[in-house]
Amino acid sequence: MPNRLAHEPSPYLRQHADNPVDWYPWGDEAFAAAKAGDRPILLSIGYSACHWCHVMAHESFEDPAIAAVMNDRFVNVKVDREERPDVDAIYMDATQAMTGRGGWPMTVFLTPDGAPFYAGTYFPKADAHGMPGFRRVLDAMDQVWRERRDDAIQQADNLVGHMRQVAGLAASVGGPPDGDDGLTPALLETARLGMKARFDPRLGGFGPAPKFPQAMTIDFLVRAAALDPAVDTLEMITTSLDAMAAGGIYDHVGGGFARYSTDAIWLVPHFEKMLYDQALLTRAYLHAHLLLDEPRYRTVVEEVIAYVLHDLHHPDGGFYSAEDADSEGVEGRFYVWSRAEIDAVCGDDADAVIAFFGVTDGGNFEGANILFAVDRTASRPAAVIRALPKLFAAREQRVRPGLDDKVLLGWNALFCRVLLEAAVAFDRTDWLEAARANLRFLLVSLRRRDGRLLRAWQAETPEDPDTGRARHLAYSEDYGALLELLVTFAELDEPARLTDARLVADELLRLFADPGAPGFFTTGSDAEALVVRPKDLEDNAVPAGNSLAVTGLLRLAALTGDTRYEAAALASLTPLAPVAGEHGVGFAYLLDGVERAVYAPIEIAIVGGAGDERTRALRREVTRRIIPASVSVTAAAGGPGPTPLLEGRSEVDGAPAAYVCERFACRRPVTTPADLRAEIDAALAARR
């Protein structure tokens, strides 16, 4: 008989609906049951595409004997970390504090008040590889609760106190010296050199295996190279991008990137595909293409966007969260090939495919082949180009990996932003319409009637009169990502979107700003009270809510001239900037905000009719290059503008004109792409 999770909208929670475990979703009912039964809470946190979450579920949560122990001695709570990043962040901090490491599935034992007293990640069913078996852990935690409860409560109280202290101090770590705000170009160079120290010059990436694509780090380096194309900076960009796009972490048949590589050579991934990785990596490849005009990077952009629009796209405009690593219960089965399959599908082109993708009889992954480009900078031969659609069609007949079809506001905003940027850069009207549809979907389906934004939408969720099919209050990450998206729409498509951007920014400040200390809280002031109110400061798999807020507010201030937004951003940025400089990989997205604080913004206003080819030619000079710490807007002459950049700006002698400005003080207007290019070059040169 299904448990309580059968009624939850989260696909991850519903994956556990048929477990014999008496699971509760996170909420008051679970905590009331723990208090009434005088039992500790066993909190299990994961996500639908998590391979080891599935392993632990199959080994332990589907085992009736283990489930009986869990049900008898604990109140068992399942959390989807993607729906509840606040809960995940708090208990991940606790897990790391207790064990020195973290990951998913996360297993935490709590007092009935929610305070953690023991934590770990994956536990095997029986003792193995130096790890205690899950049954032994259950027995031990039950014994602690019954016989040494005071010790457990004291441990929990000490840990919560430590977590609260860390949360209160985190934003002020590394504050500016001697009253100086510390916001200088030296910070950016310190960050670049720190990235260089971690760079793998042979295989690309930053750090040892397992290797995660550091898309935000690469994006920072692209902006750095736009100001100073140093050889070592360009090497970090191209080596990393080429290695990832050639490796097995990239789906050469269907497009899209897996979450990370288990090895140093980018060959063997855990095969889950996350929407946020597609967003951040597409942006890194797009910006690298605009900087270097490298066709390989454009191909990656086109293929990843095609993948998302084909496999992660809801008909109403939203983008789904993820695809699983497993299909038919086997990790990677959907993606790997035997040599015989390649021969059968590709026919006369098989030899070229086998040579290009390193296919062997024995395979490179559990007897099968993960496709990878043997020569990471080689162009695909004609035979390979012909064969790929055949491989795709054949693969479409297989059982697909599980789909997490919830739509998350922040992740959608991240992908929609790069989709819009790529649409404008490549003149793809189909992508532009998809981006517009996504924005409409987010503003309607993930917003409550009173305007409060919500985190997650799922088509199978029963309709609610006030919230529709959306659930959970949105976090600072969601508000910040949507703010960034709206500002990008104002720059590239509809200047009037600045009105929406200001509304989101005002709510971001009202709900998430800390009046007593720097940094934005993860949760709103109207949210459920947890044992700690966290601040999301460090950029991890996705940009931190604080980083998104800071950068979005600085961009909005540059376009509107509203100093409130700049002041709020700088109040959060300034104490963190020295830390971001010293630990650039951990604060790579925030470095965009640092750049915008270090340099006066380059403001570009183009005045001319949208249908005029001369206007479009001027605009291409802006949208097809990298201009760090800049904002831009395009509008017809004479109409009321939502930004001071358009005030008093007009065409010149009947020709569309471009104005390059700094804090709304503009250079002479120009009317040709060559002259605009020269003006932008001069503005960038002044920063060097």
Image (cartoon, helix red, strand yellow):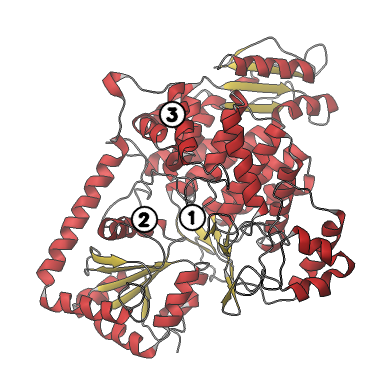
Which residue is found at the position 21% from the left and 80% from the top?
37
Q: Are marks 3 and 1 in contact (CB under 8 Å)?
A: no
Callout 2 amino acid:
Ala
Label 1: few (<14), some (14–19) or many (≥20) C-alpha neighbours in 10 Å: some
Q: Would residue 422 appear left or right of 263 to someone viewing this image?
A: right
Q: Residue at x 66, y 37 (%)?
A: 288
Question: Looking at the image, is 570 positioned above or below residue 440?
Answer: above
Does any portion of residue 283 appear in the rendered image? no
Q: Residue type at mark 3?
A: Thr
Q: Which of labels 2 and 3 is toward the front?
A: 3
Q: Which residue is mark 1?
A: 209
Closer to the N terminus: mark 2 or mark 3? 2
Residue 559, image quadrant: top right
Expressed as whole percent of the image width and height from the top left, the position of residue 247 reads 64, 55
Circle 3: element type: helix
Circles 2 and 3: CB distance less than 8 Å?
Answer: no
Is residue 250 depicted above or below 362 in this figure?
Answer: above
**Dot 2 corresponds to which residue?**
89
Q: Which residue is mark 3?
A: 190
Q: Secondary structure at mark 1?
A: loop
Secondary structure under tag 2 reads: helix
Q: Quadrant of the C terminus?
A: top right
In the depicted view, which residue is nearer to us: 574 or 563? 574
Vertical placement of 183 versus 553: above or below?
Answer: above
Q: Nearer the viewer, mark 2 or mark 1?
A: 1
Whole-angstrom CA distance, mark 2 to mark 1, is 24 Å
